[in-house]
Image: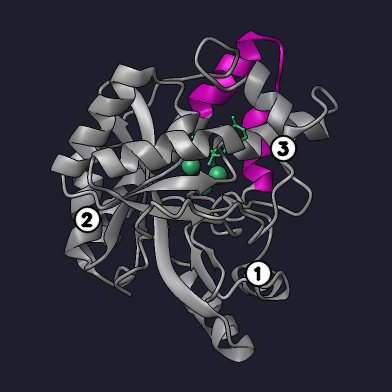
Amino acid sequence: MSSYDLHCHSRVSDGTLSPSELVRRAHAQGVGVLALTDHDDLRGWAEAKRAADACGIELVPGVEISATWGRSTVHIVGLRLDPAHAAIVEGLARNRAGRTERARRIADELARHGIGGAFEGAYALAENKELIGRTHFARFLVEQGRVKDVRTVFRKYLVKGKPGYVHHEWAELSEAVDWIRQAGGQAVLAHPGRYNFGREKLRLLFAEFRAAGGEAVEVVSGSQTPDQVPVFADLALEFGLAASVGSDFHAPGEGGRELGRLQPLPERCRPVWAAW
Ligand code: AMP
Ligand code: MN
Ligand code: MN
Ligand code: MN
């Protein structure tokens, strides 16, 4: 039985390793099946696939789509999709198009709180200039010596109610699921434990995600805590969703995460890879 890690990021989005470095690191960590799931971009696939074939790890084409659900942002992972399919390629280009303007608004908000030069700082740290994200702002704030680490930034800045937060309209949840399905992939609700939703809102999200064509939910995630595993295992079962696992690795030494370092999936879960 291979070990699975179905969620991680390269420099094509907000990771710090190139796609091939990421694949080689996963292989060295004992991962047997890896999905590359950069935010809103599939352009790491070709390089990652060459590296995967060279070292003998199984690579799954994937993506993590930023989506709007009501007034909230949620993330939808797509797995085993065709990375050249027009529906998703064009949809993701639209999602990316709003990011630079959003980054300017984030920088304006930070400037209002006395932090200047944030746009230029984040821009310089983003390898993919179409994909400036909050992680790049977070690393800039750490680099400036304002905050000790990225995790702390996301408690004090860039989130609802804190300096540097701005609302943004991404693709609708149902659109994101549609793009994935049209490209032949499976839609997975990413890290439901990170949205700070109460029980009833979570149940509504699971129901709407399922109704939109979603197939699985991340039960084990580097972006969730160990005590959330049984909670989401039960909810997955209740809503007839399969279960996925992913480290959400971004950078060596950042956030205490490592590729492939994941708790086992509870026995009662149906793994998203059961029919692969
Ligand atoms: P964006 O797509 O620009 O909104 O950025 C979202 C990214 O910010 C996520 O993929 C994570 O990499 C990072 N992030 C968001 N919330 C947190 C958090 N609480 N702790 C650490 N990283 C976070
Ligand atoms: Mn990220
Ligand atoms: Mn995410
Ligand atoms: Mn992620």
- Could you tell me the amino acid type at mark 2? Trp
The mark nearer the N terminus, 3 or 1, is 1
Toward the viewer: 85 or 100? 85
Residue drawn at (37%, 67%), measured in percent from left and top?
Answer: 273
Whether 91 is among the magenta residues is no
Mark 1 = which residue? 26
Q: Kindly report the secondary structure that dominates the magenta region of the rendered protein.
A: helix
Mark 3 = which residue? 139
Residue drawn at (38%, 52%), measured in percent from left and top?
Answer: 269
Instruction: Residue 21: give x, y in percent of width and height.
Output: 68, 71
Instruction: Name which quarter of the figure residue 113 lies in.
Output: top right
The mark nearer the N terminus, 3 or 2, is 3
Label 1 C-beta lies within 8 Å of the nearest ligand 4 atom: no
Instruction: Residue 238: give x, y in percent of width and height.
Output: 26, 38
Task: Tell me where the magenta segment starts and ends, as one range.
Answer: 104-125
Binning the other alpha carbons within 10 Å of mark 2 as few (below 14), some (14 to 19) or many (20 upward) gives many
Q: Is residue 86 left or right of residue 68?
A: left
Mark 2 = which residue? 179
The mark nearer the N terminus, 1 or 2, is 1
Residue farthest toward the front in the current orientation of the protein: 267
Q: Is residue 16 left or right of residue 103?
A: right
Instruction: Name which quarter of the figure residue 135 lies in.
Output: top right
Mark 1 or mark 2: which is in front? 1
Mark 3 or mark 2: which is in front? 2
- Could you tell me the amino acid type at mark 3? Arg
Color style of the picture: one colour
